[in-house]
Amino acid sequence: SQELEQSPQSLIVQEGKNLTINCTSSKTLYGLYWYKQKYGEGLIFLMMLQKGGEEKSHEKITAKLDEKKQQSSLHITASQPSHAGIYLCGADRGRDDKIIFGKGTRLHILP
Amino acid sequence: NAGVTQTPKFQVLKTGQSMTLQCAQDMNHEYMSWYRQDPGMGLRLIHYSVGAGITDQGEVPNGYNVSRSTTEDFPLRLLSAAPSQTSVYFCASSYLSPRQGHYEQYFGPGTRLTVT
């Protein structure tokens, strides 16, 4: 079974609207990474959350970690075409550098 | 710094052929990893290395070999390519940031491999 479940799998949003992507872990989270991937390109690091309740922002993207629920949510405010891509969450299992990734959420922004 | 570089960008192989995907980083990172990305499957870890001379298996290691003779290079070898290995392959390097308190991971641009 998948350790990290992302929802939704894909999302189509009108430009200017807000949206939320969720990432839920079936195992203990020591840290949660968020990456963005533009179609056909490599991954770009967005942010990393380590402590329960921690919230970080990167431009118009905000992510929060709920340690008790073993869940993180990524929220985009006033979406723009530049936000389109695949968003992946990755879990830090607390040993060396192995990061396990979710399947990703494909985000499309309609003009 | 060039960061993480991967070659080739694209490759087409016939079933049974062998090849090596190259990965190099110039950031002196200890840790390097290989992932494959398939539609609907996300990123899956193939092999990783915690330093020169040390490698270990990830989630999907079968059909792939790696070696880490230097800190900079981490090649991925396909011994006998199969259509199931058609995928996009990403190499990553990372280090433990003392200031941030977590690993910072940098990805290469990827290699698109098709096995016919």
Image: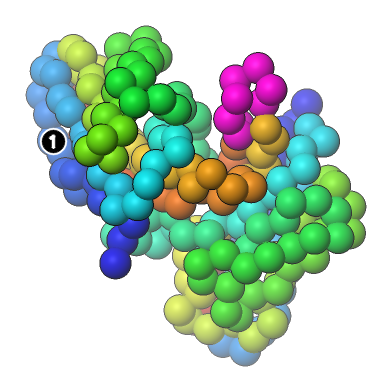
In this rendering, would A60 be left or right of B9?
left
Q: Position of residue B37 (x, y in %)?
A: 45, 58
Residue beneath label 1, please? Answer: A12
Q: Quadrant of the N terminus of chain B?
A: top right
Residue A87 position (above or below residue B13): above
Task: Verify whether residue B101 appears in magenta.
Answer: yes
The reply to whether residue B11 is in sight is no
Q: Residue furthest bottom?
A: B16
Q: Position of residue B96 (x, y in %)?
A: 67, 32
Residue B78 position (above or below residue B22): below
Q: Residues within 10 Å of mark 1 (few under 14, many from 20)?
A: few
| Residue drawn at (69%, 49%) of the image | B32
Tell me the subunit letter for badge 1: A
* Number of marks present in the image shown: 1
The reply to whether residue B2 is in sight is yes
The magenta span reads B97-104
| Residue drawn at (69%, 22%) of the image | B98
